Image (spheres, rainbow, N blue to C red):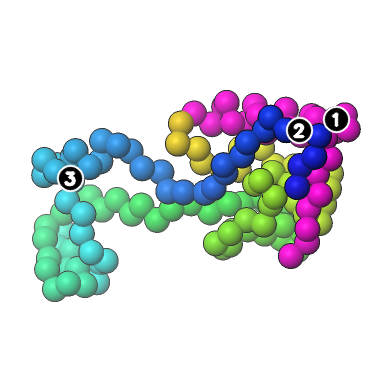
Amino acid sequence: MITNCPSLIFHLQAHPTINSEIFDKIRHGKIHPRPDIQSVSDQTVHFTDGSSSQYDVIIAATGYKISFPFFDPDFINWKDAEQVSLYLRIFHPAHPSLFFIGLLQPQGCIWTLAEVQSKLIGQLLIRKIQITIQLA
């Protein structure tokens, strides 16, 4: 909970990156979504629905993993996590002096949101606001 800061409104969540042009490319036959790959033999890709096709390139859009190799894995390890346990995706509930900026994916430019996160942390550090985080 944030106190002494009535003008801040937060809507933060993780989501996949979606390019609005992809739907147009699919609609016009430039991109062909396919089911899971069962096997690959030379340039023939066999899919789990029983279909197969010839391809020159396979692009595996598998997502991303959050990694902090400079932290001991026993301290913070979100490499295989499905959810990052940070309040507002900034504040670690067990480490009140550790902050994360930019560990989110906005619909638009990240810089504006990173600036707001930085200002929020600054307000906390100069004690203009207080944050209470409940440990899960």
Q: Which mark is residue 100?
A: none
Q: Residue at x 76, y 33 (%)?
A: 5
- Whether the magenta-drawn stretch holds residue 123 is answered as yes
For marks 1 and 3, the one nearer the N-term is 3
Q: The magenta stretch spans which residues?
A: 109-136
Q: Residue at x 63, y 36 (%)?
A: 9
Is residue 6 among what the camera can see?
yes
Which type of secondary structure does the marked residue at label 2 adopt?
A: loop
31 above or below 34?
above
For residue 44, which quarter of the picture?
Answer: bottom left
User: Is 60 left, or right, of 127 in this rendering?
Assistant: left
Q: Nearer the viewer, mark 2 or mark 3?
A: 2
Crowding at mark 3 (Cα within 10 Å: few <14, some 14-19, many 20+): few
User: Is 85 left, or right, of 44 in this rendering?
Assistant: right
Q: Residue at x 59, y 31 (%)?
A: 113
130 above or below 16?
above
Q: Mark 1 and 2 residues: CB-CB less than 8 Å, in contact?
A: yes
Could you tell me how far apart the alpha carbons at marks 1 and 3 are, in whole angstroms?
50 Å
Q: Which mark is residue 26?
A: 3
Q: Which mark is residue 5?
A: 2
Amino acid type for the residue under numbered disc 2: Cys
For this rendering, which residue is in front, 119 or 28? 119
Amino acid type for the residue under numbered disc 3: Ile
- Residue highlighted by disc 1: 128
For this rendering, which residue is in front, 71 or 116? 116
Which type of secondary structure does the marked residue at label 1 adopt?
A: loop
User: Is 49 left, or right, of 20 in this rendering?
Assistant: left
